[in-house]
Image: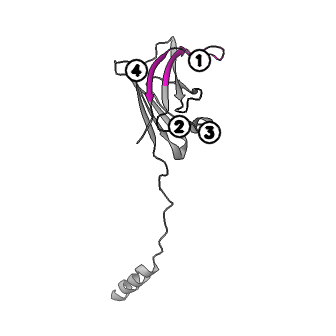
Amino acid sequence: MAAAVALAWIAVTPAQVSVVPLPDQTVTAAPLAATVPIGETGPRLDVTYVPEAKRMVVGAVGLKPDGVHDHELWLVPADGSPVLSLGVVKPGEVRSMVLPANVTAKLGDGAGLALTREPLGGKPADKDAGPVVAKGAFTRV
């Protein structure tokens, strides 16, 4: 019995254990976050952008559909270039989306967000955006 224990101990000595390094998990850019309060009634958008994944998460907390309008979220670049649509917000849902390069290039500290009230389906291509009902700005977290 002692011989079996000794053989088992020799078979797994630390000198024979190989160490496999984990992939580099270093975060190269801090996420961006914004809160966009909608009036003073409590509904808001919580928006997070994760640079490594080029992914934005939008939560429409407390926003309820009215059956007549949709709300469209817009990126307002800090450099003054034209606003970019981030799509229609779904009330009461948390959605995740991968952003295209033309949008990610404009994201950074101070980039703003605007929420507009639009007809169902979002801003019609042949019309100006509807009224801005809420604003916010990104900060690094």
Can residue 12 be seen here? The reply is no
- In percent of width and height, residue 14 lies at 41, 79
Q: Nearer the viewer, residue 43 or 130?
A: 130
Segment colored magenta: 114-136
Which of marks 4 and 3 precedes in the sequence? 4
SS under mark 1: loop
* Residue located beneath label 1 in the image: 123
Q: What amino acid is at disc 2?
A: Leu
Task: Report if residue 124 lies within the magenta region.
Answer: yes
Q: Which mark is residue 38?
A: 4
Comparing labels 2 and 1, the label whose residue is closer to the camera = 2
> Against 117, is 19 above or below?
below
Label number found at residue 6? none
Q: Looking at the rendering, in which quadrant would you find the C terminus?
A: top left
| Res 107 label | 2
Residue 100 in the image, given as x and y percentages of width and height: 61, 37
Q: Residue 93 vs residue 79: left or right?
A: left
Q: Quadrant of residue 15?
A: bottom left
Q: Distance of mark 3 from mark 4, alpha carbons?
A: 28 Å
Q: Name the residue type under label 3.
A: Ala
- In the displayed orientation, state which residue is furthest to the right: 126
Question: Can you see residue 6?
Answer: yes
Crowd around label 4: few <14 · some 14–19 · many ≥20 (10 Å): some
Residue 82: name its quadrant. top right
C-alpha separation, residue under disc 2 versus residue under disc 1: 22 Å
Mark 1 residue type: Lys
Q: At x 42% / y 21%, what residue is drawn? A: 63
The amino acid on which the numbered mark 4 sits, given as a three-letter code, is Ile
Dots 3 and 4: beta carbons under 8 Å? no
Which label sits in the foreground, 3 or 2? 2
Question: First in sequence: mark 3 or mark 2?
Answer: 3
